[in-house]
């Protein structure tokens, strides 16, 4: 048996959440193994994040104000107790990052490390009436995750780079580790663990926009197949991209004081977002509604600013954070300063709150399994992205909590002795697609998933019948294409498992979306075009049962409902456009 | 193709671009230099270009495999 090892805590996924889990677990002295399908330190959405939510009452932050914003923007689906955990732990995790070598933008505009208690610059990020409490502390270096890798290694954790985990090992009703293979050598890897943490990120279906392209829902799909309960997978994420350069997510010069320069119009030249002229992630839901009404396509108006002034700021920004988007636009021959550019909204899967259901100890419903970061589903899954920096904040805080609690569990149990024949069965599943000499290519199945999910009428302007139609196709992919999918080499085998996971996630997202018979936040159904407080201040949960999904709901705690006596128009500030 | 060029002459063989690629596109050849083995899987994230210490990589915004648009 090659590559078979034992550990106390196995962490799957080496982005910020996984690294925090690994370091958090190592602090208790137990043996920890961290695996990632890529290279830890240069993988995960964290690499592309420009900042982390940061709350500190010493700086005058008022927790009630922050909770109110999360609740209102997330449209009363956000669990206040989870939001509190997020805020109250953010400063400690931020200090961990400083200790690991993270630099921040300082208040005087320079970049550097922060002394204890020093407040970094926290600019007003996409200021709008939807999100006016800024939470974002801006990172100063694009190499930040390399510091995290070093912290993981310094903690004494073993890292296995380029190991694609393919399935969880479930024995005696308990998660007992995971199996996978080395993407370059083809070595089969089976890690037996007393506790396992899933921190493998979001599901993005490799669509337009980048920074999420490695997230193929591996953890969510593995947990679902293993029988874990899932939560809040219906909430979809949208990003805005330039159509002819679709890796570019244009935030505009909004880190500057004046975000009103990002003007978005319909084909008639109308600023259809009204007062919300700038393309915040909350109002993105209005774009496909405008197109649906026949007033598309959507355009980004030329910046009404001096190109040279902003170009300098942008080039400086490109060096430190997310994407080099002005460079990309230049290479595509697009001039965002002088030309009207067509824009699209890209569907980027379930984010950031939906995934494997966790409790406040980050424990999943299966014993021995914990989850953190984008892969985890907790009460933070609002109906719209509540504030900039939530993804990183959630990754750091839940990662740390998951690591600590995985250790507590690991200390209570013994490793299960797993029979060689069981491991052999997992090996067959892992390498199955490579044994086939004919069948559907991985590219074909991925394309079919994208063609099914990406049209706006499926998950942007939804309708029960169209969701059912999409689900019918996805079930066909699951039942017919996947068992006949062929991988021609190890790189393709990795893709085969990614595609298998994406198909599984598509099924979960569509199934949960069909169940939510209302509209809320960026979740818009034209057959149920209103928020339904009477029936839907609830989370959707589900698990695998037979071939299908068993779906149920859980009431959102009453203290998170907001003031339900407020008139509808006032309570829900985001106004949908009807066609 | 999105990775237009990895300049063989400029490449110092450090392997950072291979680590930066989270889609397993970039490999090292027999001479220890980087090359795009699966360029069609590149999504033009620019990580390799940004991280290359020798400025040997040039990425184009065009994806190797077009993604269906929403409308």
Image (spheres, coloured by chain):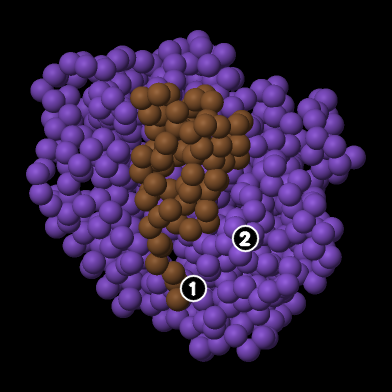
- Chain A's colour is purple
Quarter where residue A421 is shown: top left
- Chain B's colour is brown
Residue drawn where x is 41% and y is 76% of the image? A457
Q: What residue does disc 2 label?
A: A329
Q: Quadrant of the N terminus of chain A?
A: top left
Q: What residue does disc 1 label?
A: A524
In the image, residue A362 sits, relative to residue A478, either above or below, namely above
Percent from the top left, x then y, of residue A407? 46, 20
Q: Is residue A206 left or right of residue A81?
A: left
Percent from the top left, x then y, of residue A232? 44, 55
Quarter where residue A557 is shown: bottom right
Viewer-closest of A205 and B12: B12
Residue drawn where x is 61% and y is 49% of the image? A323
Viewer-closest of A338 and A51: A338
Residue A407 visible, this orientation: yes
Residue drawn where x is 63% and y is 47% of the image? A322
Percent from the top left, x then y, of residue A485? 17, 50
């Amino acid at each position: 048996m090659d590559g078979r090892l034992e550990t106390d805590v196995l962490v799957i996924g080496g982005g910020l959440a996984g690294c925090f889990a690994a370091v958090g677990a190592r602090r208790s002295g137990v043996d920890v193994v961290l695996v990632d399908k890529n290279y830890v330190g240069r993988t995960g959405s964290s690499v592309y994040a420009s900042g982390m939510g940061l709350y500190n009452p010493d700086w005058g932050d008022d927790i009630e104000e922050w909770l109110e914003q999360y609740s209102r923007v997330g449209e009363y689906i956000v669990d206040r107790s989870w939001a509190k955990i997020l805020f109250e732990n953010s400063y400690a995790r931020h200090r961990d990052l400083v200790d690991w070598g993270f630099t921040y933008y300082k208040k005087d505009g320079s970049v550097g490390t922060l002394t204890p208690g020093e407040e970094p610059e926290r600019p007003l990020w996409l200021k709008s009436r939807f999100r006016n409490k800024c939470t974002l502390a801006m990172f100063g270096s694009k190499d930040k995750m390399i510091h995290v890798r070093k912290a993981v290694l310094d903690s004494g954790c073993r890292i296995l780079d380029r190991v694609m985990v393919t399935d969880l090992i479930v024995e005696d009703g308990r998660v007992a580790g995971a199996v996978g293979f080395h993407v370059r050598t083809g070595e089969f890897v089976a890690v037996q663990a007393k506790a396992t943490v899933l921190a493998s990120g979001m599901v993005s279906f490799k669509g337009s926009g980048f920074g999420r392209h490695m997230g193929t829902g591996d953890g969510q799909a593995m947990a679902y197949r293993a029988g874990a309960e899932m939560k809040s997978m219906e909430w979809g994420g949208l990003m805005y991209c330039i159509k002819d350069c679709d890796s570019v997510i244009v935030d505009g010069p909004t880190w500057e004081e004046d975000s009103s320069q990002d003007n978005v119009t319909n084909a008639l030249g109308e600023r259809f977002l009204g007062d919300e002229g700038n393309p915040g992630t909350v109002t993105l839901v209005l774009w496909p509604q405008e197109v649906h009404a026949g007033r598309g396509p959507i355009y980004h108006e030329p910046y009404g600013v001096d190109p040279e002034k902003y170009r300098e700021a942008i080039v400086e920004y490109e060096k430190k954070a997310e994407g080099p988007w002005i460079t990309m636009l230049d290479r595509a021959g697009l001039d965002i300063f002088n030309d009207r550019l067509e824009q699209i909204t890209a569907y980027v899967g379930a984010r950031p709150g939906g995934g494997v259901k966790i409790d406040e100890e980050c424990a999943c419903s299966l014993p021995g399994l914990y989850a953190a970061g984008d892969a985890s589903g907790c009460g933070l899954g609002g109906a719209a992205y509540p504030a900039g920096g939530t993804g990183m904040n959630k990754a750091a805080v839940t990662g740390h909590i998951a690591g600590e609690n995985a250790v507590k569990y690991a200390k209570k149990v013994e490793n299960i002795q797993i029979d060689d024949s069981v491991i052999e069965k997992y090996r067959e599943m892992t390498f199955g697609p490579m044994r086939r000499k004919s069948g559907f290519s991985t590219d074909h199945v991925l394309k079919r998933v994208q063609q099914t999910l990406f049209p706006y009428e499926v998950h942007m302007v939804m309708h029960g019948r169209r969701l059912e139609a999409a689900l019918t196709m996805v079930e066909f992919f699951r039942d017919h294409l996947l068992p006949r999918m062929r991988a021609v080499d190890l790189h393709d085998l990795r893709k085969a498992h990614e595609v298998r996971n994406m198909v599984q996630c598509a099924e979960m997202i569509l199934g949960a979306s069909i169940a939510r018979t209302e509209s809320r936040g960026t979740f818009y159904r034209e057959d149920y075009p209103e928020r339904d407080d009477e029936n839907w201040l609830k989370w959707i949960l589900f698990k695998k049962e037979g071939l299908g999904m068993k779906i149920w709901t859980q009431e959102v705690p009453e203290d998170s409902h907001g003031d339900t006596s407020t008139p509808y128009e006032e309570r829900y500030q985001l106004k949908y456009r009807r066609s | 193709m999105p990775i237009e060029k990895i300049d063989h002459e400029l490449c110092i063989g450090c392997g950072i671009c291979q680590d930066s690629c989270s889609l397993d596109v970039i490999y090292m050849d027999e001479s220890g230099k980087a090359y795009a083995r699966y360029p069609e899987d590149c999504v033009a994230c620019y990580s390799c270009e940004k991280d290359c210490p020798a400025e040997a990589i040039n990425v184009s915004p065009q994806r190797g495999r077009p993604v269906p648009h929403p409308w």
